[in-house]
Image: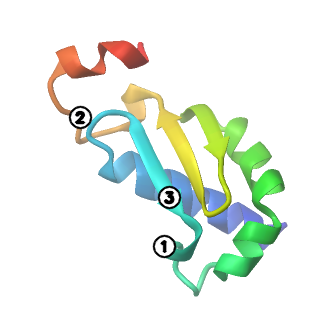
Amino acid sequence: MEKMEAVVDYVIANGTQHTSNGGWITYFDHIPITIATPDFVKDNAEEIGDMLAVREEVLDIEIYNDNFDIVYGLAYCPDLQDDDDLAVYE
């Protein structure tokens, strides 16, 4: 459980810091190996996805074979682009 929580924390921190529009895809093999292997993330993707889905930063999540596709709440994303481009997420 601790390793899954570390994955969740990394995915959210990475996504919210790098998105410019609220959406961000995190590929399993882009998560640092010091946190979890891609196989661990893939094997536990549904449970990790459930943990991500209940976090207040996450508005929507899709889980694919090799990534988490997440829409974050704009209040958690410091590097946003033009507000007109973001209206779709509000």
Q: Residue at x 73, y 79 (%)?
A: 39
Tell me how far mark 1 sits from mark 2, CA to CA: 22 Å
**Residues tagged 1 and 2 counted as in contact (Cβ below 8 A):** no
> Considering only order in the chain, which callout, 2 or 3, is on the residue closer to the N terminus?
3
Q: Nearer the viewer, residue 71 or 4?
A: 71
- Name the residue type under label 3: Thr
Q: Specify the quadrant of the image occupied by residue 44.
A: bottom right
Number of other residues with Cα within 10 Å of mark 3, as a class: few under 14, some 14 to 19, many 20 or more: some
Q: Say which of 31 and 1 sits in front.
A: 31
Residue 80, numbered circle = 2
In the drawing, what numbered circle is on residue 26? 3
- Indicate the position of residue 12 as horizontal and vertical percent values: 52, 51
Dot 2 amino acid type: Leu
Q: Amino acid at mark 1?
A: His
> What's the coloring here?
rainbow
Residue 26 is left or right of residue 19, and the answer is: right
- Other residues around mark 2 within 10 Å, as few (<14) / some (14–19) / many (≥20): some
Look at the numbered disc 3 and give the secondary structure of its residue. strand
Real-space Cα separation, disc 3 to disc 2, in angstroms: 18 Å
Rendered residue at 76%/59% (across/down): 45
